[in-house]
């Protein structure tokens, strides 16, 4: 009888339509990029929350052809997430040992040790990073972890203050109830569309084409310097006016390439052409390694994306008080141009900060949750706003007319400083 009364009381204390409180998640995270997965891991490991689910619109985790760079800032943050995640991530990357800088004519203007050699900086394949974060988020047999649901595209949500929940709506009609919602759904975030409501992201005028391939295949097709005689750890940058093309070893026996150009897809004559055709046209008459890599990668494996950012804002939802159980994280919160190479690192830091602020907070208490989210937003907006602005300036400068000379000067000066400090 006592148990019956207890369960009736529990049901009464829950909210409309739920069978038991078990139906209410602690946290729902939208997006399984570096932001969403690191947040899931941090919330589980630091805050001790277990009813955390990541919802991802994609139907599978596919190896996508892009690489990114991480340094000490990223590893120091990942260290806080347990499971030796920092060492795992470090071990799947490649530290640049040598840098070669070329003009589009093929003239080599720098060929020396990389100033990043033997530092904590690594290039990694994006998919390998995502896999390491996913494995950590899902946890191990001893401690358990969080669950990730694919094929789950969020289309709308609303906070129900009286019930102390957020109600999520997915494109297949599924409805989910959660104490907290984190929008880690990238620069075009649907969650941001409601909490900040600042329209579409800003196109920077720059397009990128990226690919990854196995080193063994690369070695068969690239018969030219600087790669012919060099092993792992070489970076090649070919830099011209308004365009550049980089090739880098990104660890785990893989090579990545990135072509970047000022290019407006909407105004382009080959707007509807496959990505490989566009990239070949953009880098026509540049050194032959470019054509070799683009053709070997193939249209379907090339990641073509525009570069977007947004104006920094003073609240991601909680600080202005209109949302009490919803916030943003990663690119959804502070989309940043890739020029500083900090996007993922900032997302990891957001995750740590959010988990720290939520530690010990009773998620049933709306005001406590709202206060924790306000502290999180304040702390992270103060850090990310100046970086968003700096990245925008640097990004604009990355296509300056004398960019190759600027880069040479930077590589020379950085190596000289490094040699001075290490001898
Ligand atoms: C050319 C380029 C180079 C870069 N280089 C670097 C670098 O060197 N170092 C670095 O740290 N960063 C770099 N970045 C930035 C980095 O990739 C991003 O900052 C990082 O991916 C942000 O992670 P995120 O999880 O916040 O968002 P994303 O990686 O964009 O992930 C968002 C996820 O949300 C999912 N999603 C979106 N909408 C929904 C929805 N409605 N429902 C469910 N799921 C949804 C998406 O499918 C996606 O999986 C680079 C970016 C670019 C474009």
Image (cartoon, rainbow, N blue to C red):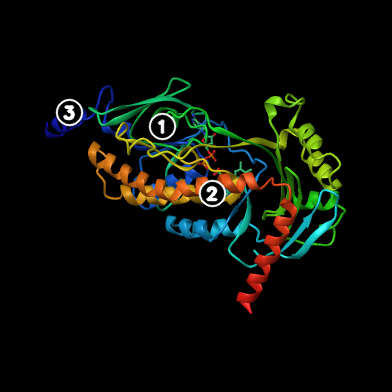
Q: Position of residue 6 (x, y in %)?
A: 15, 33
Which element is circle 2 on? helix
Q: Is residue 307 above or below residue 168?
A: below
Label 1 crowding class (10 Å Cα cut-off): few <14, some 14-19, many 20+? many
Question: Which quadrant holds the N terminus?
Answer: top left
Q: CA distance from mark 2 to mark 3?
A: 56 Å
Q: Residue farthest to the left?
A: 2
Q: Position of residue 44 (x, y in %)?
A: 38, 48
Q: Nearer the viewer, residue 35 or 316?
A: 316
User: Which quarter of the frame holds ligand 1?
Assistant: top right
Can residue 131 be seen here? no
- Rendered image: mark on residue 196: 1
Circle 1 or circle 2, nearest the eye: 2
Q: Residue farthest to the top?
A: 173
Q: Position of residue 363 (x, y in %)?
A: 27, 40
Q: Is residue 289 left or right of residue 245?
A: right
Q: Disc 1 vs disc 2: Cβ atoms closer than 8 Å?
A: no
The answer as to whether callout 2 falls within 8 Å of ligand 1 is no
- Residue labelled with disc 3: 8
Q: Residue at x 87, y 53 (%)?
A: 223
């Amino acid at each position: 009888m006592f148990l019956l009364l207890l369960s009736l009381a529990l049901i009464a204390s829950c909210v409309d339509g739920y069978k038991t409180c078990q139906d209410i998640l602690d946290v729902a995270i939208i997006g399984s990029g570096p932001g969403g997965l690191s947040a899931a891991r941090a919330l589980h490991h630091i805050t001790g929350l277990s009813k955390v689910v990541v919802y991802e619109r994609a139907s599978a985790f596919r190896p996508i052809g892009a690489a990114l760079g991480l340094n000490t800032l990223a590893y120091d943050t990942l260290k806080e997430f347990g499971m030796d995640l920092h060492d795992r991530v470090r071990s799947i990357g490649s530290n640049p040992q040598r840098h070669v800088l070329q003009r589009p004519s093929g003239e080599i203007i720098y060929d020396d040790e990389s100033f990043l050699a033997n530092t904590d900086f690594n290039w990694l394949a994006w998919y390998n990073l995502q896999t390491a974060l996913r494995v950590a988020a899902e946890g191990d047999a001893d401690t358990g972890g969080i669950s990730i649901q694919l094929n789950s595209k969020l289309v709308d949500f609303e906070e129900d203050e009286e019930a102390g929940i957020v109600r999520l709506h997915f494109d297949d009609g599924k409805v989910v109830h959660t104490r907290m919602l984190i929008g880690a759904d990238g620069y075009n975030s649907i969650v941001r569309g409601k909490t900040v409501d600042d329209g579409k992201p800003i196109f920077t005028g720059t397009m990128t084409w990226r690919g990854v391939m196995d080193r063994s295949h690369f070695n068969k097709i690239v018969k030219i310097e600087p790669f012919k005689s060099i092993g792992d750890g070489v970076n090649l940058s070919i830099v011209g006016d308004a365009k550049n093309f980089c090739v880098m070893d990104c660890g785990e026996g893989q090579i990545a390439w990135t072509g970047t150009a000022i290019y407006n897809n909407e105004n382009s004559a080959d707007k509807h052409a496959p990505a490989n055709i566009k990239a070949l046209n953009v880098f026509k008459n540049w050194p032959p390694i470019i054509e070799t890599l683009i053709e070997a990668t193939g249209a379907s494996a090339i990641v073509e994306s525009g570069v977007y950012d947004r104006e920094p804002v003073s609240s991601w939802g909680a600080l202005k008080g209109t949302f009490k159980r919803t916030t943003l994280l990663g690119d959804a919160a502070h989309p940043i141009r890739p020029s500083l190479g900090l996007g993922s690192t900032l997302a990891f830091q957001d995750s740590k900060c959010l988990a720290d602020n939520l530690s010990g907070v009773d998620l049933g208490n709306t005001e406590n949750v709202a206060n924790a989210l306000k502290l999180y937003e304040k702390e992270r907006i103060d850090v990310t706003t100046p970086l968003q602005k700096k990245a925008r300036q640097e990004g604009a400068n990355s296509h300056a007319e004398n960019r190759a000379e600027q880069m040479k000067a930077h590589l020379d000066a950085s190596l000289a400083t490094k040699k001075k400090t290490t001898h």
